Amino acid sequence: MSSIWDLGKYKDKTALIDEHGNVLTYGLLKAESYILAEQIGRRCLVFCLCRNEIGSILGYVSFINNSIVPVLLNSHLEEELLNDLMAAYEPGFLWVPKEQMDQFSGMEQMYEAYEYVLLRTGYVKDCLLYGELGLLLTTSGSTGSPKFVRQSYTNILDNARSIVTYLELDETERPITTLPMNYTYGLSIINSHLLVGASILVTDKTLMEKEFWSFFKESKATSFGGVPYTYEMLDKLRFYRMELPSLRTMTQAGGKILPELHEKFAKYAKEQGKRFVVMYGQCEATARMGYLPYEKAVEKKGSMGIVIPGGKFRLIDVNGKEITDPYITGELVYEGKNVTLGYAECKDDLGKGDERGGILETGDMAQFDEDGYYYIVGRKKRFLKIYGNRVNLDEVDRLIKGAFKIEAASVGVDDHMYIFVTDEKYVEPVKNFIVGKTRLNPAAFKVLFIDEIPKNDSGKTLYKELTKYYER
Amino acid sequence: MTNLEKYTKVFEETFSVSAKEAQSLKYQDIEAWDSVGHMGLVSALEDAFDIMLDTDDIIDFNSFEKGKEILAKADYGVEF
């Protein structure tokens, strides 16, 4: 029986507060968690449709602390994708927003708490779950593949502890939610803060809403996290002029922030006596692997920093040898207890044990400088980060091929994907299709018409050739 | 082109909606108008009218109608 958070230890402290004034103390969170887990009564799989709401976090905490394995999904997930995932994994239960119950009309409602309901799916046969398996997450922005990352209880606890150490978190912290909780970075904020008895300000409102900032100020938020795009938005909002005396720390992850913005926020933080912490991580390493100590934020702009406490970085060249000199590019390899067990693509994979042995080849190409600070310079695989979500370009091509029976080639830079098709009539439908699949803002996708997709003699697509059509 | 036409056109282009749909639009009514879309909208309006919106106005701007009120303020002086 594993229990990550000792909720009883902070029983009189506030664990969760939302913008409507609902408050849950650690003591109440513990009690509510227990009651919810009792309804299920056994170790099995539960799909959670997540929102940044108290009910959603309650479900997550309850399941993790009571050895029930949650799969965290976005509540806006396309219905067809959700159905595919249900068919592949056959979860016994769903934990969903009450508002969305109509979507599951055939299922029996078993319990309700904080605007969330527990539904029995009708799948009765539990699959085998590996004993250490704690949680399943999608690899950030998934384009609908049924692939989950298998995280163990040790992974979650070890990474949360490490974050607590390097960010120096304690019970006076009051982080406000700015990232979805089903996203590994957003979740790591919840995981680490519940460990120290901090109070989490829970809201589904966005930075672009007045209600977000009223809640921020009234509830005296001390920190938030953001992907590169979040910081672009804050820049647009002329964040630097806002009066936010309670704010102590801003963290950034989910892709490489533009060096100009890195500098702007680092300087702002320095002048205001706040901390700006750039971090690096992946869902495959639970959440975090590297961080740039805030004191170095200005000096080392563009760097993702050093390895987190308890971890180890090394760079490997094409021949598999370790790089020992600065400014030489190699694949970044991470070692630590937060390296996850592996992937799952169907329910039979949930019985699998640890396939990585604590070592993760990140797929990111990096260098370090003479002081040992790491810089991400490229990627081994073809994927983009769109608003912090990983989108695999080959998968996009495959999806389009599957749906339209046409050839497509997608390329681009972070936050801007370009999809090339060879028939003009597919430009609109392909765009709508990909927007629908990824559920990301359409502004990130441009579908362009081209006579022919460039290929070499052996028929391999020459993606580099396509860059000339969109580079400004 | 009148200011109202120009204003409406920014909505049409940013969110791929018709002029009619634009007129009743509110923040998060459609997937395109999320926080990311909002930033695009603000930038496009700033370019179209050569203005710079204040923080409070950006976060107060939660519908087509509200946006008109904001732009009509003395700070920006866009007449509809």
Image (cartoon, coloured by chain):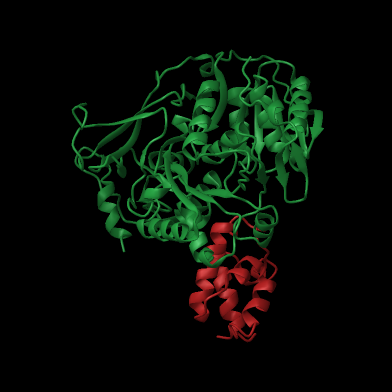
Along the viewing direction, whichever of A50 and A168 lies nearer the viewer:
A168
Answer with the quarter of the image where residue A291 lies.
Answer: top left
Compared to residue A197, the image places residue A221 above or below, namely below
**Left or right of residue A413: residue B2:** right
Compared to residue A431, the image places residue A312 above or below, namely above
**Left or right of residue B77: residue A94:** right
**Left or right of residue A64: residue A335:** left
Where is residue A222 drawn, in percent x and y?
59, 50
Q: Is residue A364 shown to the viewer in this render? A: yes
Q: From the image, which quarter does the C terminus of chain A lie in? A: bottom left
Compared to residue A77, the image places residue B12 above or below, namely below
Give the total number of marks visible in the rendering. 0
Answer with the quarter of the image where residue A105 lies.
Answer: top right
**Residue located 66% across and 49% down the image:** A204
Compared to residue A397, the image places residue A69 above or below, namely above
Along the viewing direction, whichever of A263 and B38 lies nearer the viewer:
A263
**Residue located 35% across and 56% down the image:** A259
Where is residue A276 drawn, in percent x and y?
46, 51
- Which chain is drawn using green? A
Answer with the quarter of the image where residue A362 lies.
Answer: top left
Q: Is residue A102 shown to the viewer in this render? A: no
**Left or right of residue A172: residue A277:** left
Q: From the image, which quarter does the N terminus of chain A lie in? A: top right
Where is residue A367 drawn, in percent x and y?
26, 41
Figure colour of chain B? red
